[in-house]
Amino acid sequence: MIIGTRFSYCLSDVMLQEVDIKDIYCIIADNEFDLNSTDSLTHWWDRQMDPMTTHMSQGKNNLHLFDFEECYMKIQTMAEDGKIAFRKDTLPSKLSDIMHQSRGAHWFELAPSQLQEDPAVKLAWDHYIMLSGLCK
């Protein structure tokens, strides 16, 4: 499971199929748009299409390769699945420190990869995921 800290970069990775939605615990989004407002999302989208935004992302924001409708549907799917959290609502402990020291990374692994896990750790993690799903 991974957590994303920069929404546009993370959405770009999902759209490029570099990251599977099933692997995402959540993406922390800035308070720059309202999921219930098409106008708000359109305004956010227009900023993503600005060539300067693409340039400043140093290749991490490739949303310009996709159309608005395609990305809008993906955003709505992720929102319905509880994959998007807003900074104003939830800011995990120490996340701002992690982001500051991340040197540009926008994905962080929440648990060791399955290749490094022993069976007991994997079983404990699977139970944790099951229980967290029941609590949503």
Image (cartoon, rainbow, N blue to C red):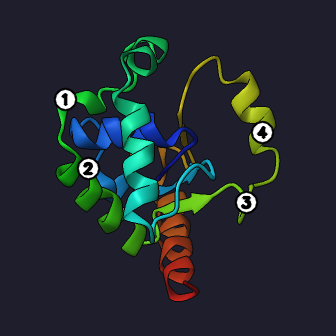
Q: Nearer the viewer, mark 4 or mark 2?
A: 2
What secondary structure is found at the residue carrying circle 4? helix
Q: Is residue 29 left or right of 19 when viewed as pictured? A: right
**Mark 4: few/some/many CA within 10 Å (<14, 14-19, 20+):** few
User: Residue visible at 56% across and 73% down?
Assistant: 128
| First along the sequence among labels 2 and 3 | 2
> Disc 4 marks which amino acid?
Ser
First in residue order: circle 4 vs circle 3: 3
- Displayed quadrant of residue 103: top right
In the depicted structure, whether residue 58 falls above or below residue 27: above
Q: Which mark is residue 21?
A: none
Q: What is the x, y in percent for residue 36?
A: 45, 71
Per the model, the C-alpha gap separating discs 4 and 3 is 13 Å
**Residue 120 higher or lower than 99, as above or below:** below
Disc 2/disc 3 C-alpha distance (Å): 23 Å
Mark 2 = which residue?
Answer: 71
Tell me whether circle 4 and circle 1 mark residues in contact (CB < 8 Å): no
Dot 2 amino acid type:
Cys
The residue under label 3 is which amino acid type?
Lys
Pointer 4 or 2: first along the chain? 2
Q: Earlier in the sequence, mark 1 or mark 2?
A: 1
- Report which residue position mark 1 lands on: 65
Q: Can you say whether 125 is above or below 113 in the image?
A: below
Residue position marked by numbered label 4 in the rendering? 96
State which quarter of the image contains the C terminus.
bottom right
Q: Are marks 4 and 2 in contact (CB under 8 Å)?
A: no
Which residue is the site of mark 3? 88
Q: Residue at x 46, y 56 (%)?
A: 40
Q: Which of 105 and 88 lies nearest the eye of the viewer?
A: 88
